């Protein structure tokens, strides 16, 4: 029932339902974990920690216990929850903790080499070696790496999110200046109080022999925010390209990072890899158009690299011009009323980028699919609506029409 409510867009009711089910047997670890996952989906991380702490050690900090026990599913869900709330530092820190778990897995294998040979547990030993060979391509690691990449690229594109300096008092009135300084003082005092409390707790933990309390020198992940986003993205993508080449998302991130670094040959290689793995992907269409718009002004310079790209580019679009390539994609969507929502949104985006038709005609690709198209999930519909709202006043009528489609498809969703 909770799952059906969630898929219908009523997450609050889903959380209440699963939490009510949990009370029937409070000693059932499985349903307790499921409740925790739902609470994190609803961005209620404090309630989620309280829920999962029923099955952690009672002494010390539950968060520290979960970290020590390498509870990766909780860390990934928590990091995504924090990212949705734009708590970038905490989210980066949580994703980085998962990355550290995999580094520990890699280092711990050396403890088993001599043991397995001595005890002649060779079959299990071979399994461990094969697991270690594919360690950095495991789904949990890839999820954590892609979560880090998403935040770092966003911060690179929006550096204002990292501004922590004082506001410009010169443009304020005396009353506004006084109010801003008072807020800054309160924030500073709160941060100092929090640091003193953590320091005191750490000291008390050592006195009482409690190993659960560990001092955290970077509780909010500020040190991770100070790192160069592109350098960190480069490091993460290199690991994915080496170990998770079979995942289309690996090459999507490789393209996004390479373009921002100005490495257009690497970006072109990533596009060919995506085309080989999933030629019908809506993400591929978006990036082919983006690449053309980026590279065309540079080809005129006439360098060897630009000439190589110009010679190779037509094979990416099946030897068609970019305009004809996009037109074929549009016709494919028009002829298939069941085309999924993500493909329709991609077509609308590239039409606006290429300035093909009006805003209304571009958004019509989304609306024409109605709620009978493939991929008709609440999340996809809501994401499409958020993008349509960002288009501006020209898309107001289309937004209203799409809202009515969502309300018919998901009648119990409270926001519609």
Image (spheres, grey):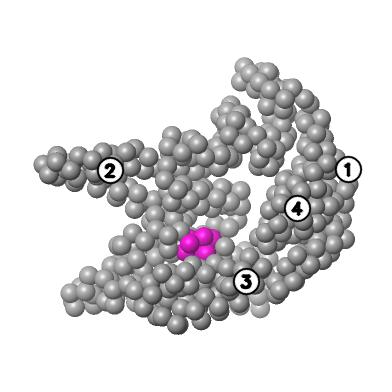
The residues tagged by marks 2 and 3 sit, at their Cα atoms, a distance apart of 41 Å
Which dot, 4 or 1, sits closer to the camera? 4
Q: Residue at x 73, y 68 (%)?
A: 410
- Identify the residue position indicated by label 2 in the image: 128
User: Where 276 sits versus 247, above or below?
Assistant: above
78 in the magenta segment:
yes
Q: Which is nearer the eye, 138 or 350? A: 138
Q: Earlier in the sequence, mark 2 or mark 3?
A: 3
Q: Secondary structure at mark 1?
A: loop
* Residue 231, placed above or below residue 36: above
N-term-proximal mark, 1 vs 3: 3
Task: Please give the range of residues in magenta.
Answer: 77-83
Q: Secondary structure at mark 4?
A: loop
Q: On the image, which quarter does residue 17 sit in? A: bottom right
Q: Quadrant of the C terminus?
A: bottom right
Q: CA distance from mark 2 to mark 1?
A: 57 Å
**Residue 359 seen by the camera:** no
Q: Which mark is residue 373?
A: 4
Residue, x 77% and y 58% (percent of image)?
371
Name the residue that disc number 1 marks: 357
Question: Picture coordinates of residue 42 (x, y %)?
Answer: 56, 70
- Towards the viewer: 48 or 64: 48
């Amino acid at each position: 029932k909770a799952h059906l409510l969630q898929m219908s867009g009523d997450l609050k009711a889903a959380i209440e339902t699963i939490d009510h089910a949990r009370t029937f047997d409070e000693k059932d670890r499985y349903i307790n974990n499921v409740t925790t996952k739902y609470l994190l989906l609803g961005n209620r991380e404090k309630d989620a920690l309280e829920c999962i702490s029923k099955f952690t050690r009672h002494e010390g900090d539950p968060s520290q216990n979960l970290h020590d026990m390498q509870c990766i599913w909780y860390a990934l869900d928590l990091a995504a929850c924090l990212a949705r709330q734009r708590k970038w530092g905490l989210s980066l820190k949580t994703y980085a903790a998962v990355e550290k778990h995999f580094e520990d897995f890699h280092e711990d294998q050396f403890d088993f080499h001599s043991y397995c040979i001595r005890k002649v547990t060779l079959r299990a030993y071979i399994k461990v070696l094969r697991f270690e060979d594919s360690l950095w391509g495991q789904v949990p690691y890839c999820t954590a790496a892609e979560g880090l990449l998403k935040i770092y690229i966003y911060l690179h594109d929006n550096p204002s999110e990292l501004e922590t300096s004082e506001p410009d008092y010169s443009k304020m009135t005396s009353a506004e200046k006084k109010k801003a300084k008072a807020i800054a003082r309160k924030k500073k005092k709160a941060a100092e109080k929090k640091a003193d409390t953590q320091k005191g707790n750490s000291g008390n933990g050592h006195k009482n022999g409690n190993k659960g309390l560990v001092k955290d020198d970077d509780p909010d992940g500020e040190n991770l925010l100070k790192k160069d986003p592109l350098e960190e993205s480069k490091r993460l993508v290199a690991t994915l390209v080496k170990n998770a080449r079979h995942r289309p998302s690996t090459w999507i991130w490789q393209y996004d990072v390479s373009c921002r670094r100005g490495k257009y040959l690497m970006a072109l290689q990533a596009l060919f890899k995506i085309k080989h793995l999933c030629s019908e992907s809506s993400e591929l269409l978006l990036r082919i158009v983006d690449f053309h718009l980026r590279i065309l002004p540079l080809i005129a310079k006439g360098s060897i690299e630009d000439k190589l790209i110009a010679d190779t580019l037509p094979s990416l679009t099946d030897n068609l011009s970019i305009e004809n390539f996009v037109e074929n994609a549009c016709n494919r969507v028009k002829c298939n009323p069941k085309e999924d929502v993500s493909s329709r949104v991609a077509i609308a985006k590239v039409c606006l980028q290429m300035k093909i038709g009006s805003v209304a005609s571009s958004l019509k690709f989304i609306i024409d699919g109605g709620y009978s198209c493939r991929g008709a999930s609440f999340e996809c519909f809501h994401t499409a609506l958020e993008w349509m709202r960002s288009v501006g006043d020209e898309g107001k009528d289309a937004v209203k029409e799409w809202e009515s489609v969502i309300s018919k498809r998901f009648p119990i969703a409270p926001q519609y």
